[in-house]
Image (cartoon, rainbow, N blue to C red):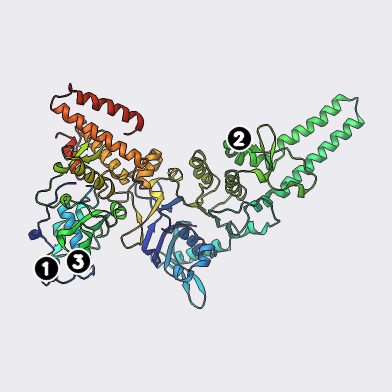
Amino acid sequence: MRKIDKNYDALLSTQYKTWVNNYESKNKKHPESRTYYDDVAMELYRCQLGVCAYTERWICPQELYDSALWVDGKYISDDSAEYQRVEHSGEMDHYDPHLKKNQYWLWSNLFMIDAKINSIKNNNQPLSYLKPDLEDYTPEKYFEYDENTHRFIPNTDKDETTRNEIQYMIDNVLFLNHGVIRGDRRDFINDIKLKIRNKSKYKVDRFFTAVSWCIDF
Amino acid sequence: MKISKIEIKDFHQFKDFNIDLTYPKGHTKEGQPLDKVCFIGQSGTGKTTLLELISFQMYRQITNIIKKIDSHVLIQNSTFEIVLKGIKYKLNVIWNDGLAWNYDLINDHNNTEIIGNARSILASWHEKKINKLIYFPSTLNYDLNIENNKELFISEVIDFSQHKVANVWNLILDKIQKYQEEELQIRQEISKTVEQSSNNLETIQKALKKLEVWKNTEFNPIKDVADNCLDKLLANFKLKVKTELDIKTKDDIGFIKVEDYNKNEIPNGLWSTGTKQLILSALPLYLLKPKNTIILFDEPERSLYPDLQRTIVDYYSSLGVDCQFFYATHSPIIAASFDPWEIIELKFNEEGKVYREVYYEGENHIDNYKWNPKLMRWDDILQKVFDLQDDGSLLRREKLNELATYNVKYRKLEKKGELGKAEAQEIIKKVEKLSKELSSWN
């Protein structure tokens, strides 16, 4: 689970920003309308480089969050484009589900995650210190990776209680070792290794953390 | 007539639901309707509803689900694209003081000759007296007492959710009886010859030879079913079709008889559900010899052991000519008989609406598919296609986490140059033990 830079000041969706700021400044409940869904989703994909915020599985083509698609602070979908705005396999997750009720569109609480994971995660809340956009968050601090089983584990330097709570997150909330994800990650890493061995071209566009921990470039 | 697209605008769990049922780019049949389709997905996603919608939308057959739901809403929300002799039509059912099936030519042809030709092709298809759709529901009627109902099998739609499958035996009863009568007649001639010419060995041999030649040349309907359809399937149960029958009248024939390898007949009442399922699925297709037919199978894996499940889809395909098969299944083994573009995986989105999960990245081209169930291991299919979270029980997951932790700890000691320490030796022992317990963990 890589660190994500969600710089609020750099948002291209300025219309959304004005809209949500208005509610925040007046301490008013956010409406549930989906007017800015695409603005927020695509902006999140920009920050997340098109991968699931937790599992780092590739879920959105770059063409969908290209900065050229924002016009006058609004995300514009092009119906004639090769990729349509719905052609991604992510869903919006509220990191702290309790904030959903009043601050549904709060930027800092939102991440795009794999729809497969969202469907089984329900409203389980990840540990607050594992929030990937926290300033002091780094994956090394909390996780390690076993290249043989291709599983993430809690950092073995942590005390047992912390390791147990992180392990619970890995297995039941973040699903970092979900069978499908783990299999995809294993295949992706092995494929890159093969390409390096064969001196073929390769592109790392997903599973950034595990790849960087398994391969010396 | 084959279906190339299904659209449902708004009906219960379906909202703007749209599935393309054609071969992808790069395929030799690119753009043509798929020959076989496999619906998979969680219970409630609508696999059976789609099968039954096909039978109603295409041929007005009112099946169990259609009876129970507000079918007017469903069909008025549904549009099919169909292909007949290379011509594409859009099929809508319209309610206007009654239901009307409306076919529009796709491609916006202005050429009156083309339009006329398309209409006459469609009209001649509707006039054809052939089986256009066969439906095998998940719960087949296993009653093996046959009733005299030949009419059913000349109808446009054969719906086995409403009719006994065993009645299909009617299709060859006359042939069996004729065969038996002829055999009896030749045998009577032999008895007569033996009686009249008991000292003339050559005459007796000649009469016997006649029976042998007759048996070799005459079409034996039961032996045909045995050799070309059922025996290879029944071999899985160490059974075969009984071909030597002692029949006096047509009523004695009854349904197909099965025996073990020691020629002991197994009474119908003792057939296993797997045996019934297999016979009652394969036999109708073999006897009806479907051509240009849409064939619907709901949960064909029922009561079948995995080794049989892996063979049936290809086998059923071999029994039809230019047919389009639709399967709904929960079985990864059945799914492994399909190319990835033939699998329609139905999933719920955030709002509880159903969508199709596609297996390709980028353009719908055969080279862009992430995986191919035909090339995958069973456990891989379970995980990647059926989204199973773990590769075993919860205990196995705990043990795998343990193993991963020891591996990481060992590597850390290795980096520090501390493999000589007792701790490293202890870890090696634990890793070896866990690896043995877990078997095939990578």
In the picture, measured across the screen, residue B381 lies left or right of residue A37, that is right
* Residue A36 numbered mark, or none: 3
- Would you say residue A203 is visible in this rendering? no
Q: Within 10 angstroms of label 1, few (less than 14), some, or many (20 or more) residues?
A: few
Dot in front, 1 or 3: 1
Q: Chain of mark 3?
A: A
| Amino acid at pointer 2 | Lys
Q: Between marks 1 and 3, how big is the CA–CA gap?
A: 13 Å
| Amino acid at pointer 3 | Tyr
Q: Secondary structure at mark 2?
A: loop
Residue receiving disc 1? A21
In the picture, measured across the screen, residue B298 lies left or right of residue A179, that is right
Q: Quadrant of residue B15?
A: bottom left
Q: Secondary structure at mark 3?
A: loop
- Badges 1 and 3: C-beta atoms under 8 Å apart? no
Q: Are marks 1 and 3 on the same chain?
A: yes
**Residue A31 image offset from top left, x and y in percent:** 21, 71
Q: Between marks 2 and 3, how big is the CA–CA gap?
A: 64 Å
Dot in front, 2 or 1: 1
| Amino acid at pointer 1 | Asn
Residue receiving disc 2? B238
- Badges 2 and 1: C-beta atoms under 8 Å apart? no
In the picture, measured across the screen, residue B130 lies left or right of residue B80, that is right
Count of numbered marks: 3
**Residue B40 image offset from top left, x and y in percent:** 42, 52
State which quarter of the image contains the C terminus of chain B: top left
Establish if A130 lies above or below B308: below
Return the residue nearer the eye: B35 or A42. A42
* Residue A66 numbered mark, or none: none
Q: Quadrant of residue B82?
A: bottom left
Q: Are marks 2 and 1 on the same chain?
A: no
- Which numbered disc flags the more N-terminal residue, 1 or 3? 1
